[in-house]
Amino acid sequence: MRHMRWSRLRRKMLPAASIAEPMLECLPAGALGAHALAARGTVPGWSWVPFLALHIVLWIVCDLLLFHGTIRRRFDPRDMPRWLAAWVLRELGNLAVAAHGALSDEVTWRNRTFLLLDGGLTREKASS
């Protein structure tokens, strides 16, 4: 819920950023890059499939290195399947949160419902 609230609030505060931001996640960025590569044909013999696969693998490696650098214990390789599952769920969840955040101008916080106004202002919705 917190992420959806934040997504809706950011959309009202920074509309241009909220349009571009979801495109900077792994899957949309990779898909856009793969489409650009296929449309331009800039690298002979490359199709969009190996480009997208390489993009995702490199993104996973970067995220794993970042994760490894932030934990205070040694990363156990046996945790890799769980970590990969969490990574996939997070990447797919980002798209769902962005889509859900675009569908409404209402947020619920501490059992109260607010209407989001432009500029990030809020007004409490009258209870019915």
Image (cartoon, helix red, strand yellow):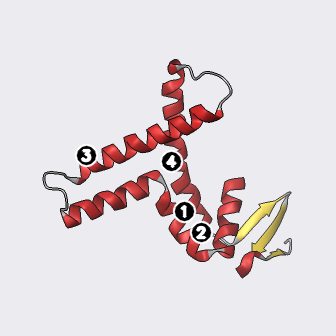
Kind of residue sitting beneath label 2:
Leu
Residue 119 coordinates in the image, percent (x, y): 72, 79
The Cα atoms of the two marked residues, 1 and 2, are separated by 7 Å
Between label 3 and label 1, give the one nearer the viewer.
3
Residue 95 coordinates in the image, percent (x, y): 51, 56
Viewer-closest of 65 and 37? 65
Kind of residue sitting beneath label 3:
Pro
Residue at the spot x=74%, y=65% of the render? Answer: 107
Q: Which residue is mark 3?
A: 50
Disc ID at residue 103: 2
Disc ID at residue 91: 4
Seen as rendered, the residue at the extreme left is 45
What kind of element bears circle 1? helix
Between label 3 and label 2, give the one nearer the viewer.
3
Q: Badge 2, how many Cα within 10 Å: few under 14, some, many 20+?
A: few
Kind of residue sitting beneath label 4:
Glu
Q: Does residue 26 appear anywhere in the picture?
A: yes
What kind of element bears circle 4? helix
Q: Which residue is mark 1?
A: 99
Whether tag 1 and tag 2 are in contact, CB under 8 A, the answer is: yes
The Cα atoms of the two marked residues, 4 and 1, are separated by 13 Å
